[in-house]
Image (cartoon, rainbow, N blue to C red):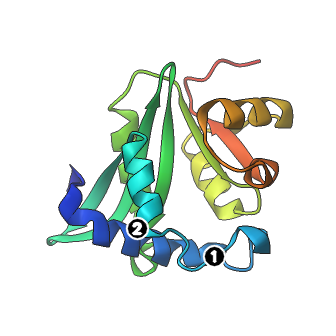
């Protein structure tokens, strides 16, 4: 079952993000990795900034989370993570399909350029990697991330994004 996450779920959201982010250890730039990958304060800031989390629940247990953030003329898919033990069971696909159904706006996803598995996941779902000049512009316009993260990330556009 997919449901909106509430304040009761904050600990589970953090567990899922920090567990799932272990896949980035040694892959993303070392200066961008930290423990925990996401702290409670950062999660709270993301929620205050409009990220709405949805969770995939199995038997009263959250197995994955994915956020969506309204940014005027687009929606951003944010913080998409599945517990390591539950990966490759379609949870990420179900969450993405659900979130896509909640908006008519074009969708964008930012991820680490070195996270080839994440890029491949979104490409299988019809997303395409945008060129570097467009990526830089979009990351600065819609995300609030440091320049180092801009330099080491990619942006993928959902199926409804206009072709160049």
Q: Is residue 60 above or below residue 56?
A: below
Residue at the spot of label 2? 40
Left or right: residue 37 compared with residue 89: right
**What is the quadrant of residue 135 in the picture?**
top right
Q: Residue at x 39, y 39 (%)?
A: 50
Q: Is residue 30 visible?
A: yes
Q: Position of residue 61 (x, y in %)?
A: 21, 73
Q: Which image quadrant for residue 23?
A: bottom right
Pinpoint residue 49: horizontal percent, then vertical percent: 43, 41
39 left or right of 44? Answer: right
Mark 1–mark 2 distance (CA, rounded to whole Å) = 13 Å
Q: Nearer the viewer, residue 50 or 55?
A: 50
Depth check, front residue: 62 or 138: 138
- Marked residue nearer the N-terminal end (1 or 2): 1
Residue at image location 71% in from the left, 50% down from the top: 146
Report the residue marked by disc 1: 34
Instruction: Give residue 119's position: percent from left, percent from top.
Output: 66, 53
Secondary structure found at label 2: helix
């Amino acid at each position: 079952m997919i449901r909106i996450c509430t304040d009761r779920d904050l600990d589970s959201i953090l567990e899922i993000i920090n567990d799932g982010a272990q896949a980035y250890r040694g892959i993303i730039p070392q200066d961008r990795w930290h423990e925990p990958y996401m702290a409670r304060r950062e999660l709270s800031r993301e929620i205050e900034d409009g990220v709405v989390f949805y969770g995939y629940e199995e038997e009263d247990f959250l197995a994955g989370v994915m956020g969506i953030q309204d940014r005027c003329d687009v929606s951003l898919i944010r913080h998409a993570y599945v517990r390591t033990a539950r990966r490759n069971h379609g949870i990420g696909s179900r969450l993405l399909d659900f979130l896509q159904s909640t908006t008519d706006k074009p969708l964008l996803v930012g991820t680490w350029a070195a996270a080839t598995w994440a890029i491949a996941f979104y490409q299988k779902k019809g997303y395409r990697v945008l060129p570097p000049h467009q990526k830089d512009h979009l990351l600065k316009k819609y995300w609030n991330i440091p320049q180092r993260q801009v330099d080491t990330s990619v942006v993928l556009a959902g199926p409804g994004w206009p072709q160049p």
